[in-house]
């Protein structure tokens, strides 16, 4: 057993981690996207704009403050390809990975979706944006598309293949008289004035002439009326009609940029990077390199001898006076693709992943923790090679985190940052045929504080680490291919439910009166078909236990529910039922046409259901849909919802999607035993407030009454779990007057007591 203290290294230079997100109001969203993968940086007059692979942020030059932009506050999409800036109109253009386009102006955000929605098939990628005279020239896989920035519309398109065919245009630039296009056919040139640029015959391919070799050109730029092109990892400059070699540093060129009289080249080699500043003679003016900041630079600009560098691994930084400053919004280090685990005011996320057939992906991005609205990142590099951390559980006794690595064993982290790794020093076994690969695929604590874990691929593929530190191991007694077991849910009868990946159903294990006595162990294998378990499908993707002790089972073909888990091993047994619901005058099985990837149960026993087509909140019995969110009607970054977790204290519900993590403040929280710690917010209620007022910390499913001081009833409701909500209106739908109102709580014993007051302030 190894015990090591984690020390998080903060660079000796100044680091700005600003833009911390606060807990949203009920019904509102916030994003938790990673901001370390910076792909482009632009100067926008009073702001520096930085695009990441998923969103963007800006830095106010005067205040050094950071503002984040995402779908939560107005962007149309998640997933940025490139940006462009128009000085004339103070406008920022954002091209997304799905070819949608936003224009941010001083008056709002305009969307142009005509490229995204074009009936043309095939690749529509927007590679680069070049702005000239209030027109934006989009370099795309379809050709050149011209945008009128003021009118926010497509003005023209140029299809410039040698035979009038569509070709990929990677970059566009211009000198005083001509427009240049870097394409897969070579460098093309057309006069700006006096010609029809929509006619491909007016575009001359100048590659293969005057010193510029034929073949694809990746970028073109103009500097001091000289044209520079990038072919693979070499630069060439035009001089008096001829092309001369300018630069090749022996590194891979990631990007060519121009700032004033300087060419800025972003380069990488063997996992390190640098930014090289050149003049038009090819002389190297400066090389900027630091492993902590230029690991994988993708874009750089220079302003007043200060260099702003966007790096795909380390985010945005500024280099000035031989020092670096990092500008990084507080955020998780990566997209969480593994488990989410929420405890009171804490969220743990696992960034590891496996393939759809449960093979390792060797993702070493570790785990991340949201605590008090601030993110702490624990990179896997700190854990001595723990790839693919995919499963999480927190010990209810001390809140220590336990993580399962699909290859590196079992990890524990306590509140002080001390961690322990278990593999060879424990009963955990390497997967058959993969020596050295210790695959922990599921974790759960039972009511006694014992930790149960799935050991994918091992002969003994179920283990328990008891509270005294001793271990017991078990072998699933069914012909499960690859000994494949994964996620574990423990029911109210201390039975362990484990999904068997790759279409092998579900397993229930009851160890009897004693963990240590194998003589009373019982096993049940659930599959599809009557008398076989009656699952809707053998491909089980997720499990959840609700507040009635029912086991909800998500599969590739909807949901099954085990409503009598206490009878699983009785004479009559207990099969899953397939709930039938009525929708649009048609009856059907619950989520029959959906791959149910995750299920979470809130404080009111309602179920959040995550699928590849978004997320639903359904009533406790599944009969009613309360919310349905997807990318079209909400800030969800992607419809592919992988994991859901709910903060029991606040009701904030976290959705991990294929493109990042967001959260929605829902109305239900977990109930409490007493009302001694009741919280009302906002309180006092400010003048003109029209949002939701939450009364949190009530006993589960209480009746909540709000009265005037004289006792006149204003509003009555039943709490959702441990929280009741009120819109500030009486039964007539009228906003209540300013003053003080009393809150009375009635619990299951029918005893009513005055619990708190709400004050409405005067205008």
Image (cartoon, rainbow, N blue to C red):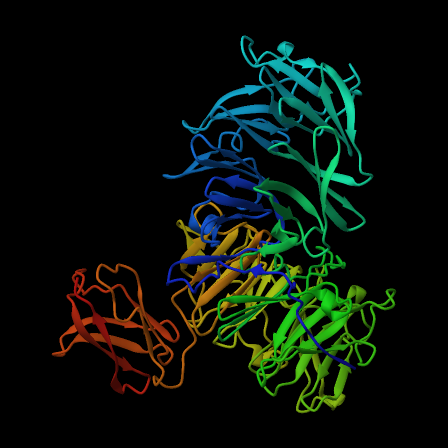
Place of residue 605 in the rendered image (x, y in percent of width and height, measured from the top left): 44, 71
Place of residue 520 in the rendered image (x, y in percent of width and height, measured from the top left): 71, 88
Place of residue 472 in the rendered image (x, y in percent of width and height, measured from the top left): 76, 85
Residue in the foreground of this view, choosing between 103 and 712: 103
- Would you say residue 577 is visible in this rendering? no
Tell me the quadrant of the picture where the C terminus can be found. bottom left
The quadrant holding residue 534 is bottom right
The residue positioned farthest toward the front in the image shown: 321
Q: Is 545 situated left or right of 109 in this image?
A: right
Place of residue 222 in the rendered image (x, y in percent of width and height, measured from the top left): 63, 26
Q: Is residue 424 above or below residue 76?
A: below
Tell me the quadrant of the picture where the N terminus can be found. bottom right
- Would you say residue 431 is visible in this rendering? yes
Q: Residue at x 38, y 76 (%)?
A: 722
The residue positioned farthest toward the top in the image shown: 194
Q: Is 218 situated left or right of 103 in this image?
A: right
Residue in the foreground of this view, choosing between 221 and 171: 221
The quadrant holding residue 145 is top right
Q: Is residue 529 above or below residue 63?
A: below
Residue in the foreground of this view, choosing between 215 and 28: 215
Numbered circles on residues, count? 0
Q: Residue at x 47, y 73 (%)?
A: 648
């Amino acid at each position: 057993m190894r015990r090591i203290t984690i020390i998080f290294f903060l660079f000796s230079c100044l680091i700005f981690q600003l833009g911390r997100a606060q807990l949203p109001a009920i019904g509102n969203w916030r994003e938790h996207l990673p901001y370390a993968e910076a792909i482009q940086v632009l100067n926008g007059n009073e702001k520096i704009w930085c695009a990441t692979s998923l969103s963007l942020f800006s830095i106010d030059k005067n205040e050094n403050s950071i503002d984040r932009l995402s779908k939560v506050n107005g962007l149309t999409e998640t997933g940025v390809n490139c940006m462009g800036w128009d000085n004339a109109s103070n406008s920022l253009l954002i091209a997304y990975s799905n070819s949608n386009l936003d224009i941010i102006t001083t008056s709002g955000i305009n969307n142009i979706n005509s490229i995204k929605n074009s009936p043309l098939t095939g690749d529509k990628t927007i590679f680069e944006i070049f702005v000239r005279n209030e027109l934006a020239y989009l370099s795309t896989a379809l050709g050149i598309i011209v945008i009128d920035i003021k009118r926010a519309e497509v003005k023209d398109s140029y299809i410039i293949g040698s035979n009038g065919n569509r070709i990929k245009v990677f970059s566009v630039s211009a000198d005083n008289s001509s427009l240049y296009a870097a394409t897969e056919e070579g460098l093309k040139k057309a006069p700006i004035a006096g010609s029809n640029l929509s006619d491909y015959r007016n575009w001359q391919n100048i590659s293969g002439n005057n010193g510029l070799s034929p073949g694809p050109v990746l970028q073109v730029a103009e500097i001091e009326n000289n044209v520079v092109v990038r072919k693979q990892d070499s630069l060439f400059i035009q001089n008096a009609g001829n092309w001369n070699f300018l630069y090749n540093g022996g590194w891979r060129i990631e990007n060519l940029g121009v700032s004033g009289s300087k060419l800025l080249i972003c380069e990488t080699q063997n996992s390190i990077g640098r930014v090289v500043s050149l003049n038009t003679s090819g002389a190297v003016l400066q090389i900027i390199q630091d492993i902590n900041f230029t690991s994988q630079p993708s874009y750089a600009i220079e302003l007043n001898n200060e260099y702003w560098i966007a790096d795909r691994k380390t985010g945005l930084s500024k280099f000035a006076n031989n020092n670096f400053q990092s500008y990084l919004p507080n955020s998780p280090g990566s997209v969480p693709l593994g488990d989410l685990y929420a405890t009171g005011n804490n969220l743990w996320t696992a960034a590891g992943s496996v393939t759809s057939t449960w093979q390792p992906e060797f993702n070493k991005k570790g785990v991340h923790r949201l605590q008090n609205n601030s993110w702490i990142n624990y990179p896997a590099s700190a854990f001595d090679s723990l790839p693919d951390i995919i499963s999480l559980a927190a010990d209810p006794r001390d809140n220590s985190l336990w993580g399962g690595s699909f290859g590196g064993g079992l990890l524990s982290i306590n509140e002080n940052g001390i961690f322990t790794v278990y593999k060879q020093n424990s009963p955990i076994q390497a997967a058959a045929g993969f020596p050295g690969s210790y695959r922990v695929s599921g974790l759960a604590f039972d009511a006694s504080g014992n930790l149960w874990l799935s050991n994918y691929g091992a002969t003994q593929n179920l283990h328990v680490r008891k509270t005294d530190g001793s271990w017991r191991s078990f072998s699933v007694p069914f012909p499960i291919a690859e000994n494949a077991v994964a996620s574990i849910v423990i029911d109210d009868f201390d039975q362990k439910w484990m999904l068997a990946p790759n279409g092998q159903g579900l397993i229930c294990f009851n160890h009897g009166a004693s963990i240590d006595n194998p003589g009373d162990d019982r096993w049940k294998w659930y599959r599809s078909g009557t008398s076989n378990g009656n699952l809707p499908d053998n491909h089980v993707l997720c499990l959840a236990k609700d507040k009635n002790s029912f086991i909800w089972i998500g599969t590739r073909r909807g949901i099954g529910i085990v409503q009598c888990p206490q009878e699983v091993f009785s004479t009559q047994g207990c099969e899953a039922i397939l709930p039938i619901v009525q929708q649009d005058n048609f009856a059907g099985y619950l989520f029959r046409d959906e791959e149910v990837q995750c299920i979470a149960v809130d404080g009111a026993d309602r179920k959040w259901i995550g699928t590849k087509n978004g997320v639903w909140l359904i009533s406790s019995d599944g009969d009613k849909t309360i919310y349905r969110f997807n990318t079209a009607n909400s800030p969800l970054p992607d419809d592919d919802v992988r994991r859901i977790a709910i903060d029991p204290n606040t009701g904030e519900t976290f959705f991990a999607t294929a493109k990042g993590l967001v959260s929605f403040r829902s109305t239900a929280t977990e109930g409490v035993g007493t009302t001694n710690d009741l919280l009302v917010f906002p309180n006092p209620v400010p003048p003109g407030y029209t949002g939701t007022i939450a009364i949190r910390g009530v006993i589960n499913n209480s009746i909540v009454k709000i009265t005037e001081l004289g006792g006149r009833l204003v509003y009555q409701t039943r709490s959702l779990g441990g929280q009741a909500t009120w819109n500030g209106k009486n039964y007539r739908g009228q906003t209540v007057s300013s003053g003080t109102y009393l809150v009375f709580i009635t619990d299951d014993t029918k005893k009513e007591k005055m619990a708190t007051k709400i004050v409405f302030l005067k205008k």
